Amino acid sequence: MKASTAKESILKKIRKALSESTPLPFPSSEGNQSVYQPPPEDLDLLFAEQFGKLQGKFVFCLNQQELQAQLELLAQQQGYTKIYCRESSFRAAFSTGSLKTALLEDSSPEALKNCDAAITACECLVARTGTIVLSSAEESGRTSSVYAPVHICIATTSQLVYDIKDGLKLLKEKYGNRLPSFISFASGPSRTADIEKTLVVGVHGPKEVYLFLVDNS
């Protein structure tokens, strides 16, 4: 008799629970909205902060003249005498000054293998993760940002987006249904912790990554 009474009590509670809807304790966890809310402004500061955490080196330039001056200073300080660059717009911009003598005329894979650093453009910059988005559609191709010991990327403030989904949307708008065959998301220098759980930098790519951000607002 007691067992039957207990069973009826349990069934009564179940029927009551089913008849009354219970609000979700964490409604935001159902995927109806983004977990990360974009800040209203200052994407450049957010990118610089996240990029620095990933051991990337960030340089902000007010204009093209400051960009060239900063690049020349970097090449002088680091002793770069063989800089690989396939971007025609950059080669034209750096046709004067000390960078002109450092830029390699040869754009073959062999020249890339023996260079001190490589300069590339990019598709966009993801501020939330400090990520450089590159593709094979650029003049730099697939290899410039990977095989050089130092990767120098030049971007503008108009290329900043907040999240990865915003970067993918930008690529979709730019290329439509003809997306590049290769899209890479580079977050700082190449690194791995597979070797005895010790972080090693520069195993599968560049040991150093510089991002020069030029203000074009």
Image (cartoon, helix red, strand yellow):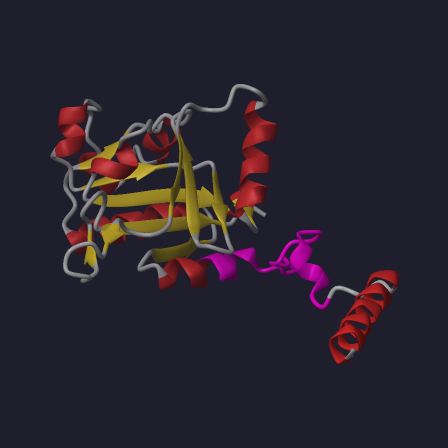
- State the image coordinates of residue 159 (x, y, percent, origin top left): 53, 43
Is 155 left, or right, of 6 in this rendering?
Answer: left
Q: In this view, does 131 lie above or below 27?
A: above
- Magenta segment includes 30: yes
Image quarter hosting the N terminus? bottom right
The image shows residue 27, relative to residue 134, as above or below, that is: below
The answer to whether residue 106 is magenta is no
Q: Quadrant of residue 147?
A: top left
- Asked if 113 appears above or below 211 in the picture, the reply is above
Magenta region's main secondary structure? loop
Depth order, front residue of 127/67: 127
Per the rendered image, the range of residues in magenta is 25-47
Q: Nearer the viewer, residue 102 or 204?
A: 204
Residue 20 is situated, as x and y percent measured from the top left of the image, at 87, 64
Q: Residue at x 18, y 47 (%)?
A: 203
Left or right: 203 with respect to 145?
Answer: left
